[in-house]
Amino acid sequence: MRHGLTRIHRFSAAAVASSAVLIATAAAAPAQAASAPAVTAKGAIVFDSTALSGKGKTLYGKTADTKRQMASTTKLMTAVVVLGEKNLSLTKKVTVKQAYRDYVAKNGASNADLKTGDKLTVGQLLYAMLLPSGCDAAMALADTYGTGTTIAARTKSFIKQMNAKAVSLKMTNTTYDSFDGISTSSKNLSTPRDMAKLAVKGMSYTTLRTVVKAKSSVQKATASNGHTRTYTWTNTNTLLGSYSGAVGIKTGTGSVAGPCMIFAATRSGRTIIVVLLHSSSVSTRFKEAAKLADWAFGTSTSSSLKLRTLPSGMQQD
């Protein structure tokens, strides 16, 4: 793999245990301007996680506890559940089923264009899910780590695991009804505050930090005919490579959810997490995330921000 996946390493037990309550914990931070810049997003939060050291502080919130659909940012929880599996093997091979391709075709969903019969590792599927926002990869992971005798049963079981993880992280205003953000009952809901808690937990995994920071990734998989197939995936987060210190995390766009984003950037030992739900447009989402991060850092680099250009015809998400 071009971007090496490492075994899971967690921060200190105290840091991980505190991830569920970090959002309400006070920590010293440089003074910001009197007020945060206005954003079109209906829901937002800015959280200083103090480099994920176990302390943190909410710097700004806009309807931060109002439940809204979150589109493909849902996939961050999918990744967290997978990475929390006991005895997880990132090199475990998963065979792509035609059902995964049929699912994305039926829903017009963002995908990693996984080919039926190809064998990819769990680690590769994380790239496929988190960079191009592949719903086919999300389904493959849910099918692999759920329990039951059918794909439907296994994916349903996996969603139950997602909800259980939300409870354990004290994400009290979050419910999942899908593994990828395509809501089946309009109950795929969260809040900016809850999603910031999830971001802190997710970034406690070395593997996830490695994946979500990658602007692109080239992966070699075994095709159904035994030959090698090369997959190239580009990250939908255009702040990577554009905003100084950007380290992830996940975009999402839906007809009901609107453009959403969980964004993280690190400068001078401080990690700022920005969550936006239902921005006015995809490009506005990125600019607003950068402005809020700048406000938190006390900088103005977003004023000259030039977003990284995605390959022609690529799904935006």
Image (cartoon, rainbow, N blue to C red):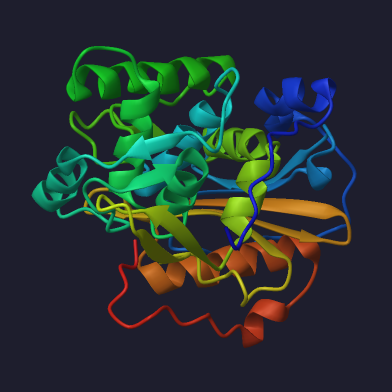
Camera-nearest residue between 309 and 54 = 309
| 283 relative position to 253: left or right | right
Residue 68 in sight from this viewpoint: no
In the image, is residue 181 above or below residue 222? above
> x, y percentage for residue 81?
50, 27
Q: How many marks?
A: 0
| Residue shown at 16% from the left, 43% from the top | 98
In the image, is residue 137 above or below residue 242? above
| Residue shown at 72% from the left, 53% from the top | 272
Camera-nearest residue between 270 and 118 = 118
| Residue shown at 36% from the left, 65% from the top | 280
Camera-nearest residue between 7 and 36 = 7
| Residue shown at 56% from the left, 36% from the top | 90
> x, y percentage for residue 137?
34, 45
Q: Residue furthest left?
A: 106
Quarter of the rendering containing residue 162: top left
| 307 relative position to 142: left or right | right
Point out the image quarter for the N terminus: bottom right
Residue 212 in sight from this viewpoint: yes
> x, y percentage for residue 11?
80, 32
Quarter of the rendering containing residue 298: bottom right
In the image, is residue 220 above or below residue 54? below
Quarter of the rendering containing residue 239: bottom right
Point out the image quarter for the C terminus: bottom left
> x, y percentage for residue 14?
83, 21
